[in-house]
Image (cartoon, grey):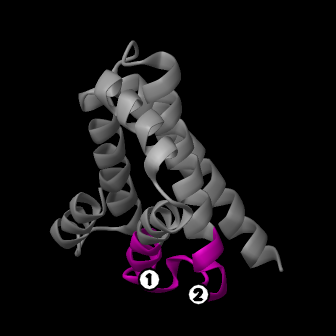
Amino acid sequence: MIKTLRQTMVRHADASLTTLIDAMLDDCVEMALREPKEWAALLMIERQVEDLRGFQAFHIGIQQTWVDAFESHGPAVPVTEIKTMSAMVHAITYGWCTQEILVFRGDRTRQASRQELGAAVHGYLNTARAQSQAE
């Protein structure tokens, strides 16, 4: 996941932040829905055998990937808020993809899933930016 997201960051280095975010969200949904039943089994096993440090390392790595994506586009996101915003974008994305895997189990289209995820992430980011500018 981290490797794929970072490759997308390289491919979209000259794109707008919105385009980069959309491409990264595309990756997340594609990976989650490629084999949802297999991912569901892996998620269940992972929670039984992975220790806390390993689990944290994965999530910290994904969050740092979002930090790097935001930082690569300068002032579009306030520097002081990048870590929090990155954590929230990861939480929204991971939570939604997990729902797709465990609850919907691949019954929804990638387009429908991606549209909902994009609305949530961009809605959050727009709200966070507006709050930051108001302060």
| Viewer-nearest residue: 126 or 32 | 32
Q: Which residue is mark 1?
A: 71
Residue named by callout 2 = 79
Residue at 72%, 66% in the rendered image: 130
Classify residue 18 as left or right of residue 7.
Answer: right
Judging depth in this view, the residue of 27 and 103 nearest the camera is 103
Residue at 53% x, 37% y is 96
Q: Residue furthest front?
A: 49
Q: Position of residue 80 (x, y in %)?
A: 65, 87
The image quadrant of residue 68 is: bottom left
Q: Which of the 4 quarters of the picture holds residue 114?
A: top left
Q: Residues within 10 Å of mark 2 (few under 14, many from 20)?
A: few
Q: Residues within 10 Å of mark 1 (few under 14, many from 20)?
A: some
Q: Are marks 1 and 2 in contact (CB under 8 Å)?
A: yes
Residue type highlighted by circle 2: Val
Q: Percent from the top left, x then y, of residue 94? A: 50, 47
Label 1 vs 2, first from the N-terminus: 1
Q: Residue at x 46, y 34 (%)?
A: 44
Above or below 50: residue 6: below
| 108 up-or-down from 24: above or below | above
Secondary structure beneath label 2: helix
Residue 115, given in percent of the width and then of the height, sits at: 45, 33
**Front-most of 27 and 2?**
2
| Image quarter of residue 33 | top left
Q: Mark 1: which secondary structure?
A: helix
Q: Can you say which quadrant of the picture contains the N terminus?
A: bottom left
Question: How much space separates mark 1 and mark 2, taking CA atoms?
Answer: 8 Å
Which three-letter amino acid code belongs to the residue tagged 1? Glu
What stretch of residues is rendered in magenta?
64-84
